Amino acid sequence: MAARFAIVLWTTDVPALASFLREVVGGRVEEAYPGFAALDVGGVRVELHDDEAYRGHPWYDALRREGAARGIGAELRAEVDDVEAAYRRALSLGGTAVQPPYRGEGFIEAVVMGPDGYLLSLWSATSADHRGRGA
């Protein structure tokens, strides 16, 4: 049996990040409790945990420092129907522009920084050669 894959993001504000993912990439909230939420984002389970959920986590002390950047070395990618609309939604919800929408060979992409500094690439194929490749 193939492993079931989930992504876990540690956050200072679970409801804010859940709302951001729901509004920008169409994530469906499956569970929500104080300090925790789980969303289905395109068939991938994304779990959001409050920093206080697991003080034994090896990054706990580093994440608790004021201004700690999160998600360094990682980028979340979402294939969306309308990159420009998703980009505008992200900015209206407090996201920070990293790369405005631009066209490449067979795709359009934009990058925003969401709550807690996670990078989110919004991507869509513009040619048949790129369709179905996923993000």
Image (tube, rainbow, N blue to C red):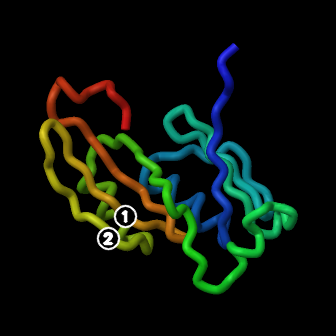
Q: Are marks 1 and 2 in contact (CB under 8 Å)?
A: yes
Up-down relation of residue 21 to residue 107 (above or below) = below
Residue 9 x, y percent position in the rendering: 64, 56
Q: Is residue 107 left or right of residue 4?
A: left
Say which label, 1 or 2, has the lower sequence index.
2
Q: Quadrant of residue 57?
A: bottom right
Q: Secondary structure at mark 2?
A: strand
- Reading the image, the residue beneath label 1 is 112
CA–CA distance in space, label 1 to label 2: 5 Å
Numbered badge on residue 97: 2
Quadrant where the N terminus sits is top right
Residue 117 x, y percent position in the rendering: 50, 70
- The number of discs equals 2
Residue 59 x, y percent position in the rendering: 73, 66
Residue at the extreme bottom of the image, as rendered: 66
Query: Crowding near pointer 2: few (<14 within 10 Å), some, many (20+)?
Result: some
User: What's the residue type where badge 2 is placed?
Assistant: Ala
Q: Secondary structure at mark 1?
A: strand
Residue at 78% across / 62% down in the picture? 58
Q: Is residue 105 left or right of residue 29?
A: left
Residue 100 x, y percent position in the rendering: 23, 64
